[in-house]
Image (cartoon, rainbow, N blue to C red):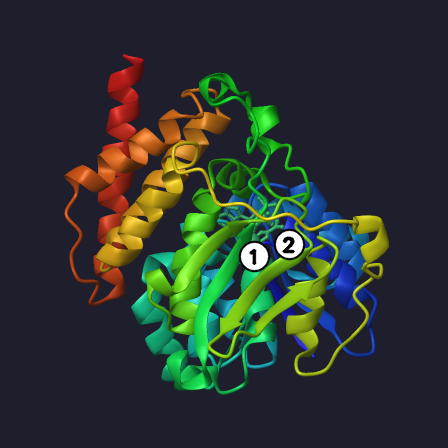
Amino acid sequence: MQVTILGATGSIGLSTLDVIARHPERYQAFALTAFSRIAELRNLCHLHRPRYAVVDDSARARELQAQLDGDGIKTRVLVGEGGLSEVSAHPEVDIVMAAIVGAAGLRPTLAAVQASKRVLLANKEALVMSGALFMQALRDSDAVLLPIDSEHNAIYQCLPGNYSDGLHNVGVRRILLTASGGPFRTLPIEQLSSVTVDQACAHPNWSMGRKISVDSASMMNKGLELIEACWLFDARPDQIEVVIHPQSVIHSMVDYIDGSVLAQLGNPDMRTPIAHALAWPERIDSGVSALDLLQTGRLDFEAPDQQRFPCLRIARQAAQEGGTAPAMLNAANEIAVDAFLNGRIRFTEIASIIEGVLDREVAVEARCLADIFDADARARALASSWLNDRNR
Ligand code: NAD
Ligand code: MG
C-alpha cells in the first residue's frame, strides 16, 4: 500500500516511517512532506525513496530537487498547499497520515477525505476547526477515518463496529477521556506564571512536537481532544468526562449502561495507534515493547483541577457553543502558544488570550470552509493585536 505522510519530519511523521519501514512488503512511502526541516526531509528521501516530496516554498523546492538529482534519487519535489493536496488525493495513494500540526493541515487532510483515502488523523486541529463540514465530507466520500490520537484510537478500539448508529443505541453511557495532567499537574499553582518553555515542553510520559507539548501542559490538548471526540464519535460534550491518569497506561475508556467499562492499555508510544490504524482491522508489529503491568505497578486517577487548567473549561464552552467557536478557540490557542514558545508571554497568559478572543468574537454557524477560515483569521488578528498592545 502507498502511504502519503503529511508532516513526515515531525514526531508523528517519524514514528509512522518507523512502523512502515518494519513492513516493506506491505507499505511504501509514496510522498513525504515538510515545512522547515529540509535537510531532514532530504535524509528521509534517501532512506525511504518516496515518489514525491513536498516543501513550503519554490526556492527550497528547487534547492532540494537539485540536491536529490545530484544524489541520484528520483523523488520529485512539489511545492506548497497545491503540492500537499496533490499527494493527498493522488490516485495511487491508499493511506494518508495527516500529521501536520495546526490549521495548516486542514485543506490537505480534507483533500484526502474527498479522494476517499484511508485517512489516519493525528492533526486534531483540522477536525476541531471544521467538525461538521469535515464529517459531512467523510459521509459524502468512501474515505475511512481512523483516529491516531492515542485517546481516540483507544476509544475507537473500545467501541463496537456499529457505534455510528449513535452512542445511546450501542449502550454507551459515557466516554472517559484520560489525560496525564502534563508536567504541571502537581506544581504549586502560584508558580505556573513563571514556568519556562523547556519545563512546559518536558512531558512526563510522551515525546511530542513543541506545540502539542505546550497544549498538554495547559490541558488545552484535552480540550481540543474533547471536541475531536464529539465529532469522531457523535457525542455531546456532556457525554465525555475527562479523567486524569498520570501513568498514561490506560489511553481512554468507554463506560456502558450495564456497568462494563472497556479500556485500552499500552506503553505510551504513538507507534501503537499508528500501527493499529495502518493495518486495521488486522494487527501488525509496531516495534512497541509489551506492557509490563508488574513494572507499572499502579494506575491512579483524579479529577482535573479547574483552577489550574482553565483551558479545559474554555474548550468545553466552545464545544457547547459550536459553530465557528472551536475554530476561534484553536486559532487563538495557536497564536498564544507560539507567543509563549517565543518568550513573548507567560504560560498563564495563554488561557487569558484565548478567553479574551472568545468573549469578544461572536461565533456564527459554519456553513462552508470560508466561514471557518474567516473565523480563524479574525481570532488570529484579535489575539495578535492583544499581543502587540501588551508588548508596546
Ligand atoms: P511536530 O511539530 O513534531 O511536527 C509537525 C509536522 O508538520 C512537521 O513535519 C512540520 O514540518 C509540519 N508542518 C508544520 N507547520 C506546517 C505548515 N504550516 N505547513 C505544512 N507543514 C507544516 O508535531 P507532532 O507532535 O508530530 O504533531 C503533529 C500532529 O499530531 C498535531 O496536530 C498533534 O496535535 C497531533 N498529535 C501528536 C501526538 C504526538 O505524540 N506527537 C499525539 C497525538 C496527536
Ligand atoms: Mg492525545
Q: Is residue 325 left or right of residue 64?
A: left
The residue pinned by badge 1 equals: 99
User: In this orientation, which residue lies closer to the viewer: 167 or 193?
Assistant: 167
Residue depicted at x 31% and y 37%:
354
- Residue most extreme to the front: 259
Rendering coords of residue 133 (x, y %): 31, 70
**Residue at mark 1 to residue at mark 2: CA–CA distance:** 6 Å
Q: Secondary structure at mark 1?
A: loop
Rendering coords of residue 380 (x, y %): 29, 39
- Kindly tell me whether residue 102 is visible in this rendering: no
Image quarter hosting the N terminus: bottom right
Rendering coords of residue 20 (x, y %): 76, 67
Question: Residue 33, relative to residue 121: is it above or below?
Answer: above
Rendering coords of residue 366 (x, y %): 21, 63
Badges 1 and 2: C-beta atoms under 8 Å apart? yes
The residue pinned by badge 2 equals: 12
Q: Is residue 106 left or right of residue 364?
A: right
- Kindly tell me whether residue 35 is visible in this rendering: yes
Q: Is mark 1 within 8 Å of ligand 1?
A: yes
Q: Amino acid at mark 2?
A: Ile
Q: Is mark 2 within 8 Å of ligand 1?
A: yes
User: In this orientation, which residue lies closer to the viewer: 306 or 44?
Assistant: 306
Question: Residue 121, relative to residue 317: is it above or below?
Answer: below
Q: Residues within 10 Å of mark 1 (few under 14, many from 20)?
A: many
Q: Is residue 367 left or right of residue 201?
A: left
Q: Secondary structure at mark 2?
A: helix
Residue depicted at x 55% and y 30%:
184
Q: Amino acid at mark 1?
A: Ala
Q: How many marks?
A: 2
Residue depicted at x 31% and y 15%:
391
